[in-house]
Amino acid sequence: MRFHEIDVLGVYVAPIALLMLAAWLAMIAARRGAARFGLLRSTWHPALFEFNVYIIVLSLLVLGVAH
């Protein structure tokens, strides 16, 4: 499948930008859940852990949209 630019209020936006925004919004919810259950306290480097989870979520979104 080919990705095409999306028209947002007259501005053409790359689809990856919208997928990155969706992954960021999903990460906000995941970060709150992880903080609630104390998962971030048990990680070695919380910022690196969050970045890796963001990349995984973004990759899953890209694969889901492409399929």
Image (cartoon, grey):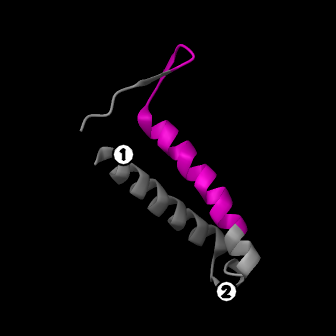
Mark seen at residue 28 = none
- Nearest to the eye among marks 1 and 2: give it: 1
Q: Please provide percent x and percent y for residue 49.
A: 58, 72
- Pick whichever, 7 or 50, lies toward us: 7
In primary-sequence order, the first of circles 1 and 2 is: 2
The residue under label 2 is 42
Work out which quarter of the rendered image holds the N terminus and state it: top left
Within 10 Å of disc 2 (Cα), the crowding (few <14, some 14-19, many 20+) is: few
- Residue drawn at x 48%, y 59% is 57
41 up-or-down from 67: above or below:
below
Q: Which residues are magenta?
A: 8-32
| Amino acid residing under circle 1 | Val
35 up-or-down from 66: above or below:
below
- In the visual, does 29 lie left or right of 12? right
- Residue drawn at x 46%, y 54% is 58
The residue under label 1 is 65
Q: Residue furthest top?
A: 10
Label 1's element? helix
